[in-house]
Image (tube, grey):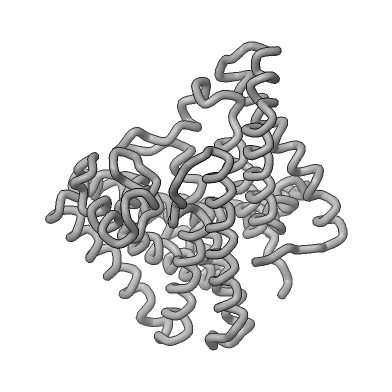
């Protein structure tokens, strides 16, 4: 399948930002926009991983079309590999941190669930029903949040209670009892993936007026509805889905205009290097984080320059450059590592 440059650039941008957000020089000195919102509201950091989910959904249109929207063993293999690698990452992190229990959720596990569930839906349901399914999932989740303490920031939140009942508290990330990649909040994340798929389909048809219209509608609707359903990344609220998907749709359309249509942005190699081997680069950031924990290099480096928000950012940019230099030969040789 011919790679779509605009999608690669957007995917690469999200991975680059993810690396910067995950590898600061010091967690005590992080720029406000790179900190996650404490609860309701959002920052740049809150947009990064969900934007990757959107891009995954958009990319699924191209990959599933090539496979004629038929379920196959490649899809199952990818689902199993994402789950397996996600749990392996969690296991290594657990051992390094000397924790006694394994987290069963996480970024890669959520990607696996979103991919697997969406693939089944997209290969078994007529595409004309996909908008209704995405909307229905968001409406269902909105009702759950409104009627079952979904906006309570604490362990009695319905999101926390269900995750705890199914997986057990020791196997969850605990932010006042809430896991940002838990099971119940996978419902809106699947809707998020399906919206990405729909935008990818419009992108492929080159109907960019329609794409811009949908992007603007989602963005405006998300902001208007936040009086009823506050924007919240930790529970992946419906308005959060709408705002992120709307913004990413408009950004993807803009990237197409700048890169593919007018050629104003010609040198896209930096972000395409990350975008063409996104999971590999993400895993490299985990390897760096483990190395810093075992060697104490990060603490030593920050003591040499002094800890503040800007030196912390400089350290993360250095990590980004290192991962870029490792991934660059793969990009130049057109080697794409896929799960």
Of residue 236 and residue 268, the one placed in the foreground of this image is 236
Q: Quadrant of the C terminus?
A: bottom right
User: Residue 278, percent across and down?
Assistant: 66, 55
Of residue 140 and residue 24, the one placed in the foreground of this image is 24
User: Residue 214, percent across and down?
Assistant: 41, 61
Q: Quadrant of the N terminus?
A: bottom right
Residue depicted at 81% across the width and 49% down the height: 328
Residue depicted at 70% across the width and 12% down the height: 304
Asked if residue 105 shows in the view, the reply is yes
Image label count: 0
Quick check: 11 above or below 93? below
**Is 265 situated left or right of 14 in this image?**
right
Quick one: which residue is furthest to the left in this view? 147
**Is 235 situated left or right of 215 in this image?**
left
Residue depicted at 45% across the width and 66% down the height: 114
Quick check: 15 above or below 249? above
Of residue 104 and residue 231, the one placed in the foreground of this image is 104
User: Residue 210, percent across and down?
Assistant: 46, 66
Residue depicted at 64% across the width and 31% down the height: 316
Quick check: 102 above or below 37? below
Of residue 162 and residue 12, the one placed in the foreground of this image is 162
**Is 299 situated left or right of 47 in this image?**
right
Asked if residue 266 shows in the view, the reply is no
User: Residue 119, percent across and down?
Assistant: 48, 77
């Amino acid at each position: 399948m011919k790679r779509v440059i605009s999608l690669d650039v957007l995917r690469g941008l999200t991975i680059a930002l993810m690396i910067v957000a995950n590898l600061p020089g010091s967690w005590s000195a992080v720029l406000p926009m790179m900190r996650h919102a404490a609860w309701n509201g959002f920052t740049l950091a809150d947009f990064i991983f969900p934007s990757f989910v959107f891009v995954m959904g958009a990319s699924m249109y191209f990959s599933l079309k090539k496979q004629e929207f038929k379920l196959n063993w490649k899809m199952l293999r990818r689902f199993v590999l994402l789950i397996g690698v996600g749990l392996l990452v969690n296991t290594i992190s657990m051992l390094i941190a000397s924790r006694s229990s394994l987290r069963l959720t996480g970024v890669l596990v959520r990607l696996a669930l979103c991919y697997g569930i969406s693939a089944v839906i997209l290969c078994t349901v007529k595409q004309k029903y996909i908008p209704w399914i995405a909307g229905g999932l968001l409406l269902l989740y909105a009702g759950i949040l409104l009627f079952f303490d979904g906006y309570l920031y604490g362990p009695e939140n319905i999101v926390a209670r269900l995750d705890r009942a199914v997986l057990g508290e020791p196997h969850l990330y605990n932010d006042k009892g809430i896991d940002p990649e838990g099971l119940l909040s996978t419902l809106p994340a699947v809707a998020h993936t399906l919206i990405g798929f729909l935008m990818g389909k419009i992108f492929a048809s080159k109907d960019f007026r329609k794409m811009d219209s949908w992007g603007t509608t989602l963005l405006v609707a998300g902001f208007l509805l936040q009086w009823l359903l506050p924007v919240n990344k930790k529970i992946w609220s419906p308005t959060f889905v709408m705002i992120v998907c709307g913004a990413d749709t408009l950004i993807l359309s803009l990237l197409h205009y700048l890169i593919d249509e007018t050629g104003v942005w010609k040198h896209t190699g930096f972000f395409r290097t990350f975008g063409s081997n996104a999971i590999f680069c993400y895993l490299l950031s985990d390897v760096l984080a483990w190395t810093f924990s075992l060697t104490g290099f990060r603490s030593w480096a920050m003591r040499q320059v002094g800890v503040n928000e800007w030196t912390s950012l400089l350290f993360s940019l250095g990590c980004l450059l290192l991962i870029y230099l490792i991934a660059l030969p793969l990009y130049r040789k057109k080697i794409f590592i896929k799960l």
